[in-house]
Image (cartoon, rainbow, N blue to C red):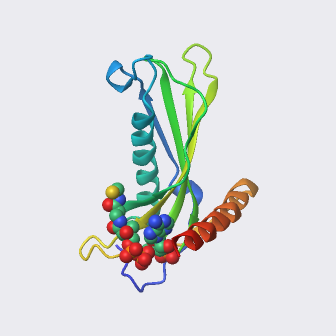
Amino acid sequence: MSQPNEVLLPRPVTASKVEMTEIVFPNDANPLGNAMGGRVMHWIDICAAVCAGRHARTPVVTANVDNIDFLNPVPVGGIVVLLASVNFAGRTSMEVGVKVWQEDRATGTRKHVASAYLTFVSLDPVTKAPRTVPPLAPETDDERRRFEAAKQRRAHRLAQRK
Ligand SMILES: CC(C)(COP(=O)(O)OP(=O)(O)OC[C@H]1O[C@@H](n2cnc3c(N)ncnc32)[C@H](O)[C@@H]1OP(=O)(O)O)[C@@H](O)C(=O)NCCC(=O)NCCS
């Protein structure tokens, strides 16, 4: 594992992408028979944490979750697919974007369920202090667009914290 002051090589977005799949069980549902928002948030947090941890290769903690919009309900039995990728890497923090889909079993088509941006901080496993993460190397036009948008959101978050 790298040391705090070591120069870290940039990592591509593809190196840490995560796809996670769940089925909505009765235990995940609200009284209307659809996935509870809290359960979807739990899955989002796990999927994003794995993604951030893959980029940093250290333990990570959730520092911030931006607005989550729930666009469509998923009924019990529905297949939920979560896609996470690192949008931006700062000094010790990373923004991860997660998009949640419902996958139709018969056709394979996907319906957008929710989206969220989360900020994770990499921690040194021994000292538990924030630890430097590798820079992100966006390669495609989409990745560069997400990188720039995430940089602006980060500036906005930092301004709000002050
Ligand atoms: C997240 C945490 C490690 C940050 O510690 P800290 O002492 O504030 O660290 P710093 O001020 O050095 O900030 C470290 C980085 O995190 C970012 N950060 C800290 N709090 C943040 C927040 N609320 N939103 C967005 N970014 C945040 C900083 O901008 C900085 O990013 P950079 O290094 O890329 O510039 C600390 O607040 C913590 O442990 N929180 C609890 C995390 C947790 O337990 N999560 C699980 C749910 S409770």
Q: Position of residue 24 (x, y in %)?
A: 41, 23
Residue at image point 40% right, 23% down:
30
Q: Is residue 101 left or right of residue 49?
A: right
User: In this rendering, would 68 be left or right of 51?
Assistant: right
User: Where in the image, quadrant-wise, is ligand 1 located?
Assistant: bottom left
Q: Residue furthest left?
A: 126
Counting from the top left corner in percent of width and height, residue 129 is at 32, 76
15 and 120: which one is in front?
A: 120
Residue 92 locus on image (x, y percent): 46, 73
**Residue drawn at x 42%, y 67% as measured from the top left:** 121
Instruction: In this rendered view, identify the residue nearer to me: 76 or 134.
Output: 76
Residue 116 visible at all: yes
On the picture, is 110 further left or further right than 122? right
- Residue at 32 percent across and 23 percent down: it is 27
Query: Taking 153 as reference, is 103 above or below it?
Result: above
Res 133 visible: no
Residue drawn at 39 percent across, 18 percent down = 31
In percent of width and height, residue 134 lies at 50, 72
- Within the image, what quadrant is residue 25 found in? top left
